[in-house]
Image (cartoon, grey):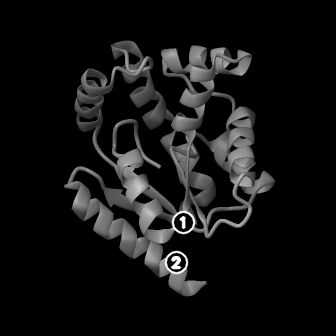
Amino acid sequence: MGGPGVGKNTLGKKLALKFNFVLVSISAILREEVAKGTEKGHLYKSFMEQGDLLPAVMVVQLLVRKMLDYPDANGYLIIGFPRDKKQAVLFNTEVKPPDLIINLYARKSVLQKRLVQRAVETLQFDDTEEAIRNRITNYFVNLKGAIMPNRIVMKMVDAEVGIEEVYSVTCGLIEEILMKE
């Protein structure tokens, strides 16, 4: 988990490849639905354009559906989740508590700068100035609630350093968990 623009997707792709995990990205799932132009896609888009969180039940349903597509997975690396306490609690009761949560930390100013740069480079429909501001605000408002249900398995990683250093630290954290199993 981590704030918008912190580097979750970039890191997640590398980690999923290294550890042979199924990568489950909430934002990618939502953008796929929006691109299909379905009724649900339109609903998701309305939340995303404002930078608002979707209801926990919707998000957990999307996660479960994606995870069920890969029943024999070596493991799942879920990006951008949980975003609030309701999502964390619902996932813990409906699926199972996570083995590890990596919280990539960066200051608001760093997130803002990265998101503005990404908006210029990728032209994502939900990277408007207002949506960026709202996503960052929502992240920090909901952070404590998202952390509390799983704080025992939470590891903080400084994401303001280079991607290779973040990758190295997170690989070490995952390897620790895998060695215990």
Q: Residue at x 30, y 23 (%)?
A: 119
Q: Position of residue 165 (x, y in %)?
A: 23, 63
Q: Position of residue 81 (x, y in %)?
A: 56, 46
Q: Is residue 134 placed above or below 74 in the rendered structure? A: above
Residue at the extreme right of the image, as rendered: 94
Q: Is residue 110 placed above or below 150 in the rendered structure? A: above
Badges 2 and 1: C-beta atoms under 8 Å apart?
yes
Type of the residue with mark 2: Ile
Label 2 vs 1, first from the N-terminus: 1
Q: Position of residue 152 (x, y in %)?
A: 56, 67
Q: Residue at x 75, y 36 (%)?
A: 57
Type of the residue with mark 1: Leu
Whether residue 171 sits left or right of residue 75 in the image: it is left
To which residue does mark 1 refer? 100
To which residue does mark 2 refer? 177
Q: Secondary structure at mark 1?
A: loop
Q: Secondary structure at mark 2?
A: helix
Q: Nearer the viewer, residue 22 or 168?
A: 22
